[in-house]
Image: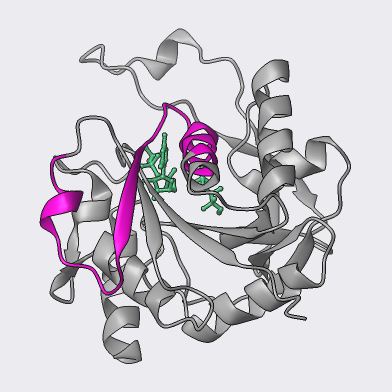
């Protein structure tokens, strides 16, 4: 009997990239001759567990369907928050007849340099877990908690242009047991649907899907991933990603 669960891949690409600040959505930034979205699909395509990919895009997206991808793609319309885009993706995957015990792999369009061996490692970890697993890296830097004193009138310059309020160190946070979450994040389809329904009902604010399981005290395994799997978030990240993609090719 074949007990290996089917893996349904989804890339979330419905964000705007406000911190990146470009005029086009950041998933369509060209690096090393391809958009981030094409790179990300190509990484998933290298996994033996993935043969097609759902792309969750913005309602006004006119770009994704004009691009060539390494594997067949199908589409869903995302939401305002990232988790709402994932929820729309879960509904689309369920409509294909997927079983609740199948695995769903969620990856950011904005993480185009994930090593393929990491994708397989997190999938294989999720297969042995009751709820799922995510890639993450242990925090490497000394962590500071800050405070911002109330800004006095002197924060206004002679031109009356308001300055960014100054921050000061409150304390150093113990980084033992702290991790930076990455994607892919891999969960059982039915359980992911349930925890996202809980997020919606409770109006929780979350930035990744593992958080939805955390709110219900459900254990999600951390799989140590490569530090090359950075997310294009700020303009500086483009320099790093260009170098990483070049070194990997
Ligand atoms: N409503 C949203 C928000 C984000 N994403 C996707 O989630 C991934 C990671 O999110 P993030 O880096 O926060 O992307 P943006 O929301 O686009 O960026 P920003 O927060 O700077 O606006 C990206 O691939 C982005 O397209 C999504 O599909 N739907
Ligand atoms: C899902 C994610 O990429 C994991 O690091 C991340 O949480 C996306 O949101 P963020 O606001 O950029 O952290």
State yes or no: residue 166 in magenta: no
State yes or no: residue 89 in magenta: yes
Residue 139's x, y, as percent?
A: 68, 65
Residue at image coords 53%, 76%: 227
On screen, residue 117 above or below 235: below
Residue 137's x, y, as percent?
A: 65, 70
Front-most of residues 144 and 139? 139
| The N terminus sits in image quarter | bottom right
Q: State whether residue 233 appears in this view.
A: no
Residue 105's x, y, as percent?
A: 56, 60
Front-most of residues 211 and 11? 11
Q: State whether residue 138 appears in this view.
A: yes
On screen, residue 2 above or below 153: below
Q: Which of the 4 quarters of the picture holds residue 201? A: top right
Front-most of residues 88 and 4? 4
Front-most of residues 188 and 151? 188
Which residues are drawn in magenta? Answer: 62-91
Residue at image coords 71%, 61%: 179
């Amino acid at each position: 009997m074949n007990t290996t669960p089917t893996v349904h891949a989804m890339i979330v690409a419905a964000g705007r990239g406000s911190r990146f600040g470009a005029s086009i959505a950041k998933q369509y930034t060209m690096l090393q001759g391809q958009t981030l979205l094409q790179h990300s699909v190509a990484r998933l395509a290298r996994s033996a567990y993935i043969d097609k990919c759902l792309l969750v895009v913005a309602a006004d997206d006119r770009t994704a369907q004009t691009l060539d991808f390494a594997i067949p793609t199908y589409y869903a319309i995302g939401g305002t928050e990232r988790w709402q885009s994932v929820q729309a993706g879960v509904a689309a995957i369920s409509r294909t007849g997927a079983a609740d015990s199948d695995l769903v792999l969620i990856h950011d369009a904005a993480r185009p340099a994930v090593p393929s061996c990491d994708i397989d490692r997190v999938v294989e970890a999720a297969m042995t877990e009751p709820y799922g697993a995510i890639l993450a890296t242990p925090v490497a830097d000394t962590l500071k908690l800050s405070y911002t004193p109330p800004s006095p009138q002197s924060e206004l310059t002679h031109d009356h242009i308001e300055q960014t309020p100054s921050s000061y160190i409150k304390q150093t946070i113990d980084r033992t047991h702290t991790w930076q979450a990455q994607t892919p994040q891999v969960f059982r389809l039915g359980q992911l649907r349930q925890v996202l329904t809980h997020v919606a009902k409770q109006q929780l604010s979350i930035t990744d899907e593992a958080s939805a399981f955390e709110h219900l005290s459900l254990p999600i395994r951390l799989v140590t991933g490569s530090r090359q799997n950075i997310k294009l978030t700020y303009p500086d990240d483009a320099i790093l990603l260009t170098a990483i993609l070049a070194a990997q090719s």
